[in-house]
Amino acid sequence: MGKDLTEKDFDQVEFWIGTGPKTFNLLYSITRDGCDASVFHQKCDNQGPTLTVLYNKEGSVYGGYTSVSWESPVSFVNKCDGSAFLFQLYFSGIETPKKFSAKTGQQTISANTGYGPIFGSSSYCDLYTFNGAVHKSSSGEYNLNGHMQNFGTLYESKETSSNDINNGHLRMTELKVYVIKKKKKSLNDVFFALDGQRKTQVLPTPWRKTAEWSPKLLESLKEEVKSIQPLEEIDVPHFNILIIGPSDSGKSSFCNLVASVFRGRISQRARVGRNSQTSTTTMFTPYTVGGKACLKLYDTRGIAETDTLDLLQCNFILDGHVPDFYEMTPTSLISFDDSDFQHKPSLSDKMHCAVFVLNGSTVGDISTPMLHKLMSYQNLLNKKGEYWLRKVINSAKKTAKNISNTFLSPAIKEVVDNVAGLLKLPRNNIWPVKNYEEEVESDENVNILALLAVRQILFLSEDYLENMKVKQSRRGKGKANRSQVDGDVLGSDTA
C-alpha cells in the first residue's frame, strides 16, 4: 500500500460519510510539511470537515473523520460530533474496510495548540497521533509519540483491537489531513491528481432532481409518506399495493425493504429466494410496514415462462376476489365456484396500485417470451384503468457503495431508459431502489431511495382512488336521475 488513497478508498470514505459526492483536498502531509503540531494547526484549523489518514510500513491504513473544525486553544477543548468516526481501510496490506462510529453523546475530538489530531477526549483518546514536533528516523518512519491505548472507549470497536489496526505501534510513513467539501454536480467539475489531490471522474448533472440527501430529508420523506392517506369519504382504511414481477426479481425483498425503512431495522418477514425458474412466494400475502404508514403490500407468486401466475388469477387479485393468504400454486388456482372466492368485493378489497419489480442487472437479458408476458400484464392493467409503477432494483456496481449517487449514475439512467423503451412506460414511473441483502444495519441512503419510490406509489394510489370516487359519484347521480324518472312515471300513472 502506497501513501495515497485510491479512488476506491475515497469512494468508501465518501459512502461512510454519506450526504452525497465529496471532494478531498490535501491540507497537510507530514512528509511534505513536517510532523509538527504548530504546522498542522496552521494548515488545518477552521477548515470544516476533515479526514486524517495514517500509513505504516506494514501496509496498514487507518484514521478518523470529523465534521467539526480543528482549533488551537492553549488548554484542551473537547467536542462532541455525532458524525465523527474512526476507520480502517487496510491491515498489513489487506483490504479490511471498517467504520467505528462515535458512541452516542460522547466527546469525539480534542483540540490543543501543541497537539496533532486527537480523536476522543483529552482524558480518553481512542486515537492520539502526536504532540510537539517529531523528526523522521533513519528508517524513514516518524515514530509518533501518541497512542491508541483507549481505542474502543468513546468510539465503537466492533471487537477489533488497536493492534489489529496499527500493528501495535505508531511508526508512520505518512500522515495526511484532507479537507472535505460537497462536490459540485457539474460537467465542468474535474479534479486532477496533483499534490495529493483526489482524481475524480466527471459526473453528469443529476438525471432526476431530488432534494439534497441528508438525515433531514429521510425524516421529511417518512413524515410525508405517513401523511398520504385515502379520502375518508370512500371508506378505504389503507392503500393496497400489488407487487408483481418475474421470479428472482426482488419482489419479496422489496416488501422487506419498505418494512425496514419504517421499522428502523432490517426486516425479513417475507421469504426470499434466488431461483429464477420457480417462485419462493406461493401465497397471496399481505404485509403491513409499520410506522403508521397507510399502505399494505401484497406479495404474489412470481412470473415465469412456465409455472406462473396467469392473467386470470391476476385479474381476480386486482378486483379483490382473492382472500389474504390464499395458496396460489399451479394446482390450486382460485375460481368462481371456490368457497373462498369473494363475489362482492368492496373498494377496500381491490388493489389501488400495481408495482412491477424488475432486476436491474438482468433487464437486458429478458427473453422474448418473458417480455410478451410482461406486456400482457401491462395491457391488462391498462384496460382496467389501474395505475402501475415500474420499479428497478439498483444493482449497478458503480453505485453499490454510493447510493446517494444513484441519480448521477449513467449506468442506472441507462437501465431506466431501457425499461422505458422495452415496456413503453414514462420514465417518471420507473424508480430504482437498492434492496437490503448483505447489510445488517439500516442505511440512510438506501432508505431515502426506497422512500422516493414509495411516495410515488402512494401518489398513484391516491390518484386511482380519486378517480374511483368520481366514478362512484357519477353512478350515484345516474341512479338518482333514473329514480326521479321512475317516480315521475309512477306519479302520472296513479294520477
Image (spheres, rainbow, N blue to C red):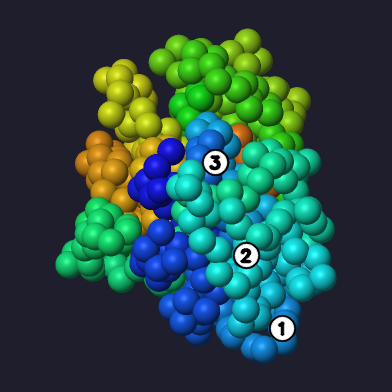
Query: Is the Cβ of the residue at disc 3 closer than 8 Å to that at disc 1?
Result: no
According to the image, label 1 marks what residue? 77
For this orientation, the residue located farthest to the left is 188
Q: Is residue 101 left or right of residue 359?
A: right
Residues at badges 1 and 2 in contact (C-beta under 8 Å)? no
| Above or below, 120 relative to 492 | above
Which three-letter amino acid code belongs to the residue tagged 3?
Ser
Left or right position of 171 against 460 = right
**Image coordinates for residue 320, horizontal then vertical, percent:** 62, 42
Q: CA distance from mark 1 to mark 2?
A: 16 Å
Callout 2 amino acid: Phe
Rendered view: 39 above or below 28: below
Name which residue lies at 80% across and 65% down: 124
Disc 1 or 2, which lies upstream in sequence?
A: 1
Give neighbour class at mark 2: few <14, some 14-19, many 20+ (Cα, 10 Å): many
Q: Which of the pair 437/334 is nearer the observer? A: 437
Which residue has dot 3 on it? 60
In the structure shown, which secondary structural element does the residue marked by tag 1 occupy?
strand
Upstream in sequence: badge 3 or badge 1: 3
Q: Nearer the viewer, residue 348 or 80?
A: 80
Residue 130 badge: 2
Q: Position of residue 173 (x, y in %)?
A: 48, 49
Q: Secondary structure at mark 2?
A: loop
Q: Is residue 275 above or below residue 433?
A: above
Left or right of 427, for residue 82: right
Three-letter residue code for mark 1? Val
Q: Is residue 127 above or below residue 94?
A: below
Residue 359, numbered label: none
Q: Position of residue 206 (x, y in %)?
A: 30, 63
Q: Quadrant of the C terminus?
A: bottom right
For marks 3 and 2, give the CA distance.
18 Å
